[in-house]
Amino acid sequence: MKFIVTGTHAYGELSLNSDLDIVMLRGYAELLIGFLKDHNIEVYRTEAQEEYKEHGGFYFDLDRMQINIIIAKDKIDLDRWKYSTKKMREMPPIKNRQKRIDTFNSLYPEDEDDIPF
């Protein structure tokens, strides 16, 4: 299974409420949903995730940890997430959440030719 840990667990600034963000392709996400349902683990979506339809992802909880599954559109999208996460790790942690999101989004390559792998 190919996936990327992103967000504050990958590049900081962690808070007590930080969820664990994991990006994966749709096929793997569907397998994970099946596994979770087989083990009676509730899968749920937020309103924001609903807006993105099939690419919105979902959440589930393990003990007190909230897991956020982000569904990449395709391998190129997964590589974009990987690239931006790598770039964020090279910077000092950004404390302000909105600034962290804006910085991440500014690093996200729009053109697949800008992804170095």
Image (cartoon, rainbow, N blue to C red):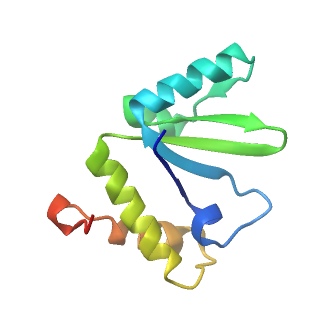
Residue 81 in picture, x, y percent from top left: 39, 57
Q: Position of residue 45 (x, y in %)?
A: 58, 31
Asked whether 103 or 77 is in front, the reply is 77
Residue lying at 63% horizontally and 28% vertically, measured from the top left? 44
**Residue 77 can be seen, yes or no:** yes
Q: Quadrant of the C terminus?
A: bottom left
Q: Quadrant of residue 41?
A: top right
Q: Residue 43 at what x, y percent from top left?
A: 64, 26
Q: Nearer the viewer, residue 12 or 35?
A: 35
Query: Can residue 53 be seen at all in this image of the molecule?
Result: no
Where residue 34 appears, x then y in whole percent? 58, 18
41 is higher (above) or lower (below) than 15: above
| Residue placed furthest toward the top | 38
Residue 67 relative to residue 77: left or right: right
Q: Is residue 40 left or right of residue 31?
A: right
Relative vertical location of residue 92 with respect to residue 69 in this rendering, above or below: below
In this picture, residue 8 sits left or right of residue 111: right
